[in-house]
Amino acid sequence: MVQLLILASVILVLFKLPLYWSFFVLIAMVAIAGHTSYSRSGKLEKGLLVATFSIAFASLLLLIPFFLIGIFPFEARYVIPTGSIFIGNSMNISSLAIDRYRGEIKNRRAEIEAYLALGASPKLAVLPSLKQGILSALIPSIDNMKNLGVVWIPGVMTGMILSGSDPIEAASIQIAIFISIFAAGLAASSIMLHYSTGSFFTKAFQLKELD
């Protein structure tokens, strides 16, 4: 409650400032999100940089089209909430992915070491674990999309309908946001797991001990 009230107060101030101030807020969000996913990874070597970059890249990649094609006006009241949606969901999916990836590597240690003993590269040895990590992390997003409009009406659509917008327009924007959330989460988790793989191995390509 305190965090949301502080955010609301900050946003009120930001609406009166030049647009570039909004990007400082998004940078702060990305930094916090990156640290959260980094902590979930078990604080892997270079994990903070990888987590922050993957979330920032995926969120920005999916945020830009909303303003380039005119879905939303390029204003602070749209940039901050939309950006936070992508950053928050990318963080959640990345955190789930790296946590599952780490668990899969730990559980499949004998299998991975057998691959390494036969001359496989670390990336090939952990490929099944990587795929499982990403798939598991995307399950909540997939289930949400399956039940979208049937079990629940999502937040953006609800807000637009309550504010008097056309339901068809609200549904169209919500669909675009959900597809973008899924794509951002897939991109962020894929980048994070791919570039985190080396942190699980020594320079001699031996699997490290995991807590």
Image (spheres, grey):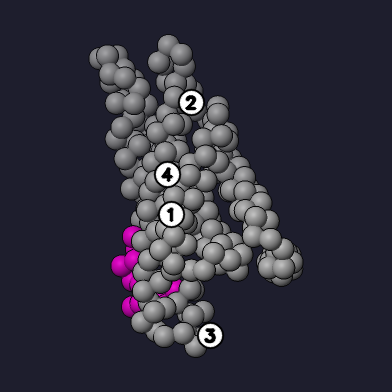
Count of all numbered marks drawn on residues in the image:
4
Q: CA distance from mark 2 to mark 3?
A: 48 Å
Above or below residue 25? Residue 134 is: above
Q: Which mark is residue 62?
A: 1
The nearer-to-camera label among 4 and 1 is: 1
**Outermost top residue:** 204
Q: Which mark is residue 163?
A: 3
Q: Residue at x 39, y 84 (%)?
A: 167
Left or right: 48, with 152 as reference point: right
> Who comes first in sequence, dot 4 or dot 2?
4
> Who comes first in sequence, dot 2 or dot 3?
3
* Residue 87: x %, y % from top left: 52, 54
Q: CA distance from mark 4 to mark 1?
A: 14 Å
> Who comes first in sequence, dot 4 or dot 1?
1
In the image, which residues are magenta?
A: 142-154
> Who comes first in sequence, dot 2 or dot 1?
1
Three-letter code, disc 2: Ser
Q: CA distance from mark 4 to mark 2?
A: 16 Å
Which element carries disc 2, helix, strand or loop?
Answer: helix
Q: Which residue position is annotated with label 2? A: 199
Q: Are marks 2 and 3 in contact (CB under 8 Å)?
A: no
Q: Residue at x 46, y 85 (%)?
A: 165
Three-letter code, disc 1: Leu
- Badge 2 density bin: few <14, some 14–19, many ≥20, Cα 10 Å: some
Q: Residue at x 62, y 48 (%)?
A: 27
* Residue 146: x %, y % from top left: 31, 67
> Who comes first in sequence, dot 1 or dot 3?
1
Q: CA distance from mark 4 to mark 3?
A: 34 Å
Q: Which residue position is annotated with label 4? A: 189
The nearer-to-camera label among 2 and 3 is: 3
* Residue 95: x %, y % from top left: 49, 46
